[in-house]
Image: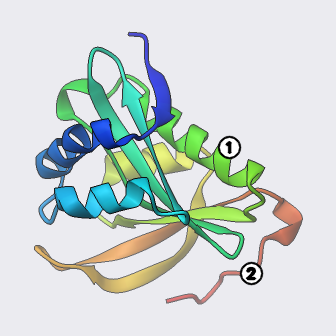
Amino acid sequence: MDITINKMTEDDVPAVADIEKACFASPWTYEGILEEVDNPSSYFLVARSDRVAGYIGVQEIAGEAYITNIAVLPAYRGQGIGGKLLRAAAEGAKKRGCAFITLEVRESNKAAIRLYEKNGFSVAGMRKNFYSSPAENAVLYTLFFNSSERKDTDGID
């Protein structure tokens, strides 16, 4: 399957909102996603095949990149789309001078955890009871772009 990764445009917002609804218990609203199109601190990328199959949202502040969400429609999973999105987001953040890119993931989301670890992310901490519906801890994963800048993260809660 041929996949292209592009910056999200306003025309992509309905598809991204549909992916949110299909993948998350508490999805972002159409309006919330639309606001990100013109937010200078954010960028969203979409993965296209025959349609928008997935997306990733990233916010960059003070040289740090934070993945707000990443999702791939169920019918398109297992085809490498999530990895392509992660790598494109990380490459972009690194080019723009960020020191690292980070995200939270539900402790029980083993498929996502495998994806992040396969793409070089490592555990940086835990956020207790971060998620609701159902309540669950979040594992904080980070990919440092310069290993000499990596700080000791032992004991982070």
Give the vertical position of 113 relative to 3 (above or below): below
Q: Which residue is mark 1?
A: 91
Residue 91 drawn at (x, y percent): 68, 43
Give the vertical position of 153 relative to 86 (above or below): below
Q: Is residue 70 left or right of residue 4?
A: left
**Residue lying farthest right?**
148
Tell which circle, 2 or 1, labels the residue nearer the N-terminal end: 1
Q: How is the image coloured?
A: rainbow
Picture disc at residue 107: none
Give the vertical position of 47 relative to 94 (above or below): above
Residue 73 drawn at (x, y percent): 22, 35
Please name whichever residue, 92 or 110, is drawn nearer the observer in this view of the structure: 92
Please name whichever residue, 93 or 125, is drawn nearer the observer in this view of the structure: 93
Within 10 angstroms of label 2, few (less than 14), some, or many (20 or more) residues?
few
Q: Nearer the viewer, mark 2 or mark 1?
A: 1
Within 10 angstroms of label 1, few (less than 14), some, or many (20 or more) residues?
some
Which element type, helix, strand or loop, lies under badge 1?
helix
Q: Which residue is mark 2?
A: 152
- The residue type indicated by label 1 comes to Glu
User: What residue do we see at 43% from left, 11% from top?
Assistant: 2
- The residue type indicated by label 2 comes to Asp
User: What residue do we see at 21% from left, 61% from top?
Assistant: 31
User: What residue do we see at 83% from left, 59% from top?
Assistant: 146
Residue 70 drawn at (x, y percent): 37, 50
